[in-house]
């Protein structure tokens, strides 16, 4: 049975899905797709330092999702390919219910990833019901959650279900219907995405013109803040001392970026200490990071007609396992935001891996005492009017709102950790609460040759004093992107 669904209808369904996912509106009218949490400085009892297992040594399990379905190998059966083509060929015109039911009875759980992709945009109504029924028949799982897309995707991530051959050929279709500007992210045959985990964050791409400090996104994006106006510490009295800032120091110049403003923009392109930096804030991951972008000017052989000296990092509107996907505006190259590595486009081809620098998550009062010469973004930032004190209103207080699959059980899902990656690739996480408690008790925090100290926020260095680049994140995010050691007191 073939039921009509216009292109406008599909788009409206997608935007309704965004609202169901609790993407809230910023003062500028652009939707905020991510959110993070404050540093919890509650004291905890410190114990002797023991070497914790790495992620690879921990049984992550998926008991709550039941046994993984048996997955065949090799190419898809031709009739299954034909049915996938029927479903995906013209989603702007309608949805082929009978073809989807045949897909559900195909016995190949690999195509359940494509059901997940469609559910992101078509949850609810008859189409959503048929998609869920087809998923259940393919996998043997029972989906009782009202938020079917999240439940389906969590199962697939937990099972680590392989994607079907030619997966991207079909997956890209609904995504490019919603946002044609995502096409470059699906067109690089050597892209480093795990496309299974690529999903929609509820907003569209920030492809506003280059060089703008701020103009709104008429179609609904998370608009980056570029070269924001700043004031000295005294002029920052508009911001309460106990509120959170993300502090960055470059060549002795310190600057504080208020958390409430970062919740609205989620990305800053700025100049600091004679360098150009990009500061993404993935609120879903509780992770503010900082990368140097001026080194892109010196890439040999990168001659693609860009405005050299003004590479700008923006928010794509896509997520990878709940982590925002950032991209460079001129080259349309996507990055793994958590690592700074280019994963698609010309910058991937050039092997770009952005150098990361430390972001201290601190309270404004502590930051300005530690760095009295600091600047801070003005109260009106680039909007020209004051920002709300809590733009997201505790949106993620009950836990992650996007699918993340299983979580490493060594810490709570949204526990704050300080993360560091050593030169040999060893990843280490320090439980923030336990670290602060130990330091406050006068204990040294040293693990695997890394020493953590507390100033305004937490910093880290090697035993020889060499400073390390660190940032804070939620535990679920750090542990899913890194095979990590853990110091937890």
Image: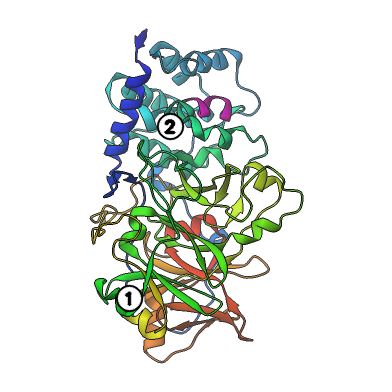
**Dot label at residue 324:** none
In this image, 417 relative to 23: left or right? right
Question: Residue 303 in the image: x percent, y percent?
Answer: 72, 45
Identity of the residue drawn at 51% across and 28% down: 171
- Is residue 170 part of the magenta span, yes or no? yes
At horizontal 28% and vertical 49% (from top left) the residue drawn is 26
Q: Nearer the viewer, residue 395 or 302?
A: 302
User: Which residue corresponds to mark 2?
Assistant: 116
Q: Is residue 322 above or below residue 5?
A: below
Query: Relative to residue 164, is residue 467 depicted above or below?
Result: below
Q: Main secondary structure of the magenta part?
A: helix
For the C terminus, the image quarter is bottom left
The outermost residue toward the right is 301
- Residue at numbered disc 1: 364
Please report the bounds of the magenta region as a residue range. Answer: 167-173
Residue mark closest to the camera, 1 vs 2: 1
Give the quarter of the figure containing the N terminus. top left
């Amino acid at each position: 049975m073939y039921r009509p669904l216009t292109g406008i209808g599909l788009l409206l369904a997608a935007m309704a899905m965004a609202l169901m996912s609790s993407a809230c509106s910023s003062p500028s009218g652009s939707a905020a797709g991510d959110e993070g949490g404050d540093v919890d400085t509650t004291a905890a009892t410190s114990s002797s330092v023991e070497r914790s297992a790495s992620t690879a040594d921990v049984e992550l399990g998926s008991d709550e999702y039941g046994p993984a379905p048996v997955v065949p190998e090799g190419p898809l059966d031709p009739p299954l390919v034909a049915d996938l083509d029927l479903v995906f060929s013209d989603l702007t015109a309608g949805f082929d219910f009978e073809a989807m039911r045949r897909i559900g009875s195909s016995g190949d759980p690999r195509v359940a990833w494509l059901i997940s992709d469609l559910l992101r945009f078509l949850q609810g109504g008859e189409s959503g019901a048929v998609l869920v029924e087809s998923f259940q028949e393919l996998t043997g799982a029972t989906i009782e959650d009202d938020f079917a897309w999240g439940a389906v995707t969590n199962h697939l991530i937990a099972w680590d279900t392989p994607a079907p051959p030619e997966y991207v050929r079909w997956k890209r279709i609904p995504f490019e219907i919603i946002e044609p500007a995502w096409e470059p992210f699906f067109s690089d045959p050597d892209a480093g995405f795990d496309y299974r985990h690529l999903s929609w964050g509820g907003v569209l791409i920030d492809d506003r013109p280059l060089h703008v400090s701020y103009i709104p996104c008429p179609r609904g994006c998370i608009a980056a803040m570029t070269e924001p106006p700043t004031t000295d510490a005294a002029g920052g009295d508009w911001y309460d001392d106990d509120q959170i800032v993300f502090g960055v120091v470059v060549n002795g110049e310190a600057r504080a970026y208020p958390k409430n403003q970062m919740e609205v923009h989620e990305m800053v392109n700025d100049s600091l200490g004679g360098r150009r930096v990009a500061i993404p804030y993935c609120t879903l991951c509780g992770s503010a990071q900082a990368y140097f972008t001026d080194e892109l000017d010196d890439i040999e052989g990168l001659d693609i007609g860009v405005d050299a000296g003004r590479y700008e990092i923006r928010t794509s509107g896509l997520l990878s396992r709940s982590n925002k996907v950032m991209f460079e505006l001129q080259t349309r190259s996507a990055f793994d935001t958590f690592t700074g590595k280019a994963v698609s486009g010309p910058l991937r081809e050039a092997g770009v891996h952005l150098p990361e620098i430390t972001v201290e998550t601190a309270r404004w009062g502590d930051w300005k005492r530690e760095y009295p010469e600091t600047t801070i973004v003005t109260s009106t930032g680039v909007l020209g009017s004051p920002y709300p004190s809590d733009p997201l209103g505790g949106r993620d207080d009950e836990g992650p709102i996007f699918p993340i699959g299983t979580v490493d059980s060594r810490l709570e899902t949204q526990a704050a950790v300080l993360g560091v990656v050593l030169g040999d690739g060893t990843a280490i996480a320090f439980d923030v609460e336990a670290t602060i408690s130990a330091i406050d008790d006068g204990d040294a925090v040293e693990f695997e040759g890394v020493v953590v100290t507390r100033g305004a926020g937490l910093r880290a260095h090697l035993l020889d004093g060499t400073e390390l680049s660190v940032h804070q994140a939620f535990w679920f995010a750090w542990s899913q992107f890194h095979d990590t050691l853990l110091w937890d007191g």
